[in-house]
Amino acid sequence: MQRFGSRHLLDLISSAYPGLVTYVDLDYRFLFVNAKFTEWYGLNPKDVVGMLVLDLIGEKEFNERKPRYDEALKGNIVKFTGKVNHQTLGVRETELTYHPDLDDEGKVQGFVAIAY
């Protein structure tokens, strides 16, 4: 029997993608992270989901990125080049996209962050 549930497809697609994928809610909390994200940071997905972004990346980096997070939370797609710290390789320059998640009424629920 084939499995085509939305959670299964999300896990399958995001695991196949070579970049980092996360979903951040209105409180700047991770609600989803893909396998590459947890490999990058050397963390267990169960430890990251529910964690505040601030607690993972630190106050300095959070404050630098917060204007971009807020722009996505206003409903705008945000694209930029930024630095992301890898657990063993150190700081790496990456292309980042924050894509807002809008409900049926057009209200922002959070955003998907993709780094590659």
Image (cartoon, rainbow, N blue to C red):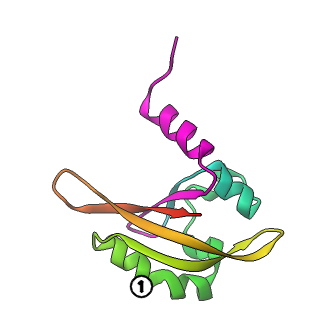
Q: Residue 67's quadrant in the figure?
A: bottom left
Q: Which residues are magenta?
A: 1-28
Q: Residue 48's quadrant in the figure?
A: bottom right
Secondary structure of the residue carrying numbered label 1: helix
The quadrant of the image that shows the C terminus is: bottom right
Report the residue at 50% width, 21% height from top.
3
Residue 79: image x %, image y %? 43, 74
Asked if the magenta segment contains residue 16, the reply would be yes
Report the residue at 35% width, 69% height from top.
77
Residue 13: image x %, image y %? 53, 41
User: Is 66 placed above or below 101 here?
Assistant: below
Q: Residue 93's quadrant in the figure?
A: bottom right
Report the residue at 38% width, 63% height from top.
99
For this view, does 44 lie left or right of residue 30? right
Q: Type of residue at label 1?
A: Pro
Q: Name the outermost residue toward the top.
A: 1
Badge 1 density bin: few <14, some 14–19, many ≥20, Cα 10 Å:
few
The residue beneath circle 1 is 67
